Amino acid sequence: MKKTSNRLADGREIVYYDARDDAVRDAVDQRPLPSTSTASEIRYDPLLSEWTAVTAHRQARTYHPPADECPLCPSRDGRLSEIPEPDYDVAVFENRFPSFAGEPGPETAEGAHGLFRHGAGAGRCEVVCFTSDHHASFASLGEDQARLVLDAWTDRTAELFQHPGVEQVFCFENRGEEIGVTLQHPHGQIYAYPFVTPRTERMLRSAAAYAERHEGRNLFDDLVADELADGRRVVAETPTWVAFVPYAAHWPYEVHLYPKRRVPDLLALGEAERTEFPQIYLEVLRRFDRIFGPDEPPTPYIAAWHQAPLTADGRADFALHLELFTIRRTSGKLKFLAGSESGMNVFINDVPPETAAQRLREVAASE
């Protein structure tokens, strides 16, 4: 893999990841862009003990452009985009409308009781373009291209862990208009947060409590071992990875993908795990597109990498894993987060996890 870093016209960084060592990436961004301006702030919720980002500048972000004006396609035929090169393998650039950006600053507490805590929304947000082909999807990539994306995620994680104030790095993909995607080009994002996210905090607390109750045993290790032993919810497996529908799945079709050897983050994956990841992940993604039959549009989904925070207690006990889920519950119907889910964070799942796993195995056999 060859890595090349350049700058866009407004000063944002763009990084190219190429499979060929002789690739040259020296195109200059010709757009007359003004300097980027962000106003990200984080505010603390004392009732839930979690942070919220307030980002007024994101109201102006690009929204559903036509295909011939896609900002993630290469710059060709006089049409200038976010990618100055006429072609690319994988490209990563700083988001023009980031939720988190800049350096950390002092935290301030206001109000009579100091409850209104706020600070700079420091960190970094990046866009990851998986391929230059506007009409592709991650599922349509070859194994070599998917491996290149994995290597890019890994390199970005290492780089962003060095960014001042960053505590956690989150690589993810939103796919489909039903999810809220506004750009159809196959891409994902990376958020570098200035705090540990609430979901990860909760997992770390659960793992610590489990170890205390069970003489130091690891919650993630035992969970993966029990799913493998039970087998009813396992949908795919390689010597180094396992994909299963979790026992208490929140979503109609939800798959968790774990390396069988516990590692805290993408940086710790070995060569065998890196080689096998594209095989199992592409297979699971392709099954997702066959769940509801050949006449249904591509399945909308969120794919989310869970990595250990940089400095949190219990980092060594955390297990890297990817959570993949769709909000489509059956043909033509979506799973909405209504009163119970949005109001009380209690999920109601209409599809039993064992049924979902069986369906995901069936669509593998239908090829």
Image: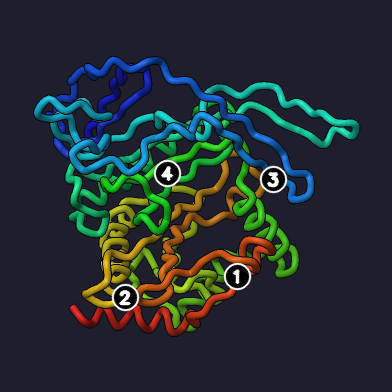
Residue 51 visible in the snapshot: yes
Q: Are marks 4 and 1 in contact (CB under 8 Å)?
A: no
Q: Which quadrant holds residue 208?
A: bottom right
> Which comes before the other along the chain, label 4 or label 1?
4
Amino acid on which the number 3 mark rests in the picture: Glu
Q: Residue at x 38, y 84 (%)?
A: 358
Q: Residue at x 69, y 45 (%)?
A: 50
> Which comes before the other along the chain, label 2 or label 1?
2
In the rendered structure, the answer to whether residue 44 lies left or right of residue 53 reads right
Per the model, the C-alpha gap separating discs 2 and 1 is 22 Å
Amino acid on which the number 2 mark rests in the picture: Ile
Q: Which mark is residue 267?
A: 4
Per the model, the C-alpha gap separating discs 4 and 1 is 33 Å
The front one of 129 and 170 is 129
Where residue 285 appears, as percent x and y from the top left, is 30, 64
Q: Nearer the viewer, mark 3 or mark 1?
A: 1
Secondary structure at numbered mark 3: strand
Q: Residue at x 37, y 15 (%)?
A: 34
Residue tagged by mark 1? 347
The front one of 141 and 143 is 141
Q: Nearer the viewer, mark 4 or mark 2?
A: 2
In the rendered structure, the answer to whether residue 189 lies left or right of residue 53 reads left
> Which comes before the other along the chain, label 4 or label 2?
4
> Which comes before the other along the chain, label 4 or label 3?
3
Q: Badge 4, how many Cα within 10 Å: few under 14, some, many 20+?
A: some
Per the model, the C-alpha gap separating discs 4 and 3 is 27 Å
Q: Which mark is residue 291?
A: 2
> Which comes before the other along the chain, label 3 or label 1?
3
Residue tagged by mark 3? 50
Where residue 229 appears, as percent x and y from the top left, is 48, 81
Amino acid on which the number 4 mark rests in the picture: Leu
Secondary structure at numbered mark 2: loop
